[in-house]
Image (cartoon, rainbow, N blue to C red):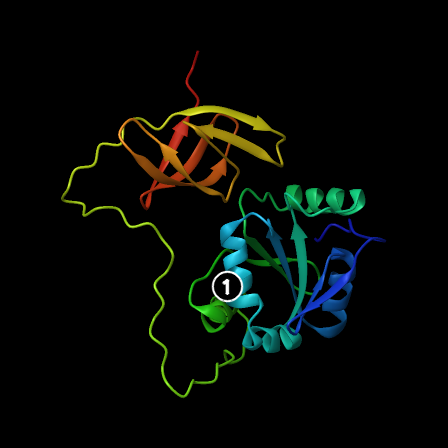
Amino acid sequence: MLLLVALCFGQVVRVRGVEWLTDAAAAQAKAKEENKLVLLDFTGSDWCGWCIKLKREVFDQPDFGRYAQSKLVMVEVDFPHNKALSAGQQQANARLQQNYRITGYPTLILLDGDGKQVGQMGYVPGGPSAFIAKLQKTTGAQGAVVKTEEPAEPEKPKRPVVWTPPPAAVPIHYGPLALKGISGTRERRIVQINNASLMAGETAKVRTQEREVVVCCKEIHDDSVMIICDGKPMELRLAVR
């Protein structure tokens, strides 16, 4: 069941047809009354690259706005670095994060009208149609996917902004990636990998003995971190002293 943690400090913001709430309890009541799903968007709105990309490619698009108006009650659960939130909102967001065991951003939790979790998603490439199709598949929702209007001239496929490593046939010797420390609170942990400090969901260039590599921090545990380096998942553990 959804925790009733946002009682008197919520607000409603309408962005390009999508109504965003910050009061989770009010959103749950609205979803039950209107027979919709609640979408909790756990995000770092002003620092998480994938969160910003999801908002730009999906949430800000008119096709998603039309779908959301009829099917969803949207709630932003934000953990910004530079934007100020009220103390009550910060506490409410932290409790929701703890309740749903969120370890990275963006994470999307979907609830039915009774507050039961019916799905969990992350970033989905491909724009509104791909996102809505994944949402419907995840939740078992019925109904046709909202179709986007075809442009007069087909657009060329856009290349995703990703770092491409050299061909696999060429051996690459990066030198050691080392987890040097874990700090912060349980809700906002920070890891030190070589020369870079990262939170869950962040990507950074990390200096090794021979070159810089791109590392994406996926999950932070008590004594280890799960990362993706050159598209390959790996686990780094704290050295035992």
Mark 1 neighbour class, 10 Å CA radius: few under 14, some 14 to 19, many 20 or more:
some
For image coordinates 37% across by 60% down, the residue present is 160
- Quarter residue 90 falls in: top right
Locate residue 186 relative to residue 202 in the image: left or right: right
Q: Position of residue 240 (x, y in %)?
A: 42, 15
- Quarter residue 185 falls in: top right
Locate residue 87 relative to residue 205 in the image: left or right: right
Q: Position of residue 6 (x, y in %)?
A: 79, 52
For image coordinates 68% across by 59% down, the residue present is 75
- The outermost residue toward the right is 8
Vertical relation: 116 (above or below) 214: below
Residue at the spot of label 1:
138
Front-lying residue, 27 or 33: 27
Q: Position of residue 188 (x, y in %)?
A: 61, 36
Front-lying residue, 49 or 66: 49
* Amino acid carrying mark 1 in the image: Thr
Locate residue 223 relative to residue 89 in the image: left or right: left
For image coordinates 57% across by 33% down, the residue present is 189
The quarter of the rendered structure image containing the C terminus is: top left
For image coordinates 72% across by 67% down, the residue present is 31
Front-lying residue, 153 or 19: 153
Q: Secondary structure at mark 1?
A: helix
Front-lying residue, 100 or 196: 196
- Quarter residue 183 falls in: top right
- The outermost residue toward the top is 241
Q: Position of residue 181 (x, y in %)?
A: 49, 23
- The outermost residue toward the left is 169
Vertical relation: 92 (above or below) 132: above
What number of labels is visible? 1
Locate residue 30 relative to residue 125 in the image: left or right: right
